[in-house]
Image (cartoon, rainbow, N blue to C red):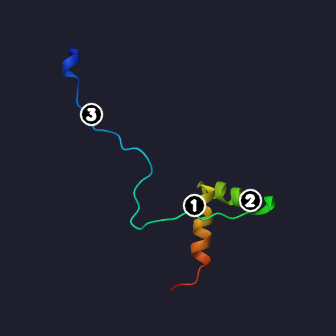
Amino acid sequence: MMSQDQRPVTPAKTRGRPRVTEPRTSVSTWLPAQYHDRLIQLANLRDESVSATVRRLLILRLPAE
């Protein structure tokens, strides 16, 4: 049996969002409710967040540099 002073060492858990390789910034816009609902449906189909769905759609539609 271990005493209070002999607790096993466990690694510290990391908190927050995972680090990304390039900096990101937020973008905000207003949409009609029907388009927001559609984005939610698409996100649910892909099992991802609405933010990830919007990001993926924008990146697909933006012209290459």
Q: Which residue is mark 1?
A: 52
- Residue 58 spot, x, y in % from top left: 61, 72
Mark nearer the N terminus (3 vs 2) = 3
- Looking at the image, which is closer to me, 24 or 53? 24
Disc on res. 10: 3
- Residue 59 spot, x, y in % from top left: 57, 74
- Residue 23 spot, x, y in % from top left: 44, 66
Q: Residue placed at 74% from the left, 59% from the top?
A: 36
Quarter holding the N terminus is top left
Disc on res. 36: 2
Q: Residue placed at 62% from the left, 78% from the top?
A: 61
Disc on res. 25: none
Mark nearer the N terminus (2 vs 1) = 2
Tell me the kind of residue under disc 1.
Ala
Label 3 – label 2 distance at C-alpha: 43 Å
Q: Secondary structure at mark 1?
A: helix
Disc 1 crowd, CA 10 A, few/some/many (<14, 14-19, 20+): few
Disc 2 crowd, CA 10 A, few/some/many (<14, 14-19, 20+): few
Mark nearer the N terminus (1 vs 3) = 3
Tell me the kind of residue under disc 3.
Thr
Left or right of 54? Residue 9 is: left
- Residue 37 spot, x, y in % from top left: 75, 57
Label 1 – label 3 distance at C-alpha: 33 Å
Label 2 – label 1 distance at C-alpha: 14 Å
Residue 22 sits in quarter: bottom left
Relative to 3, is 22 above or below? below
Left or right of 55? Residue 8 is: left
Tell me the kind of residue under disc 2.
His
Relative to 62, is 25 above or below? above
Relative to 43, is 8 above or below? above
Residue 52 sits in quarter: bottom right
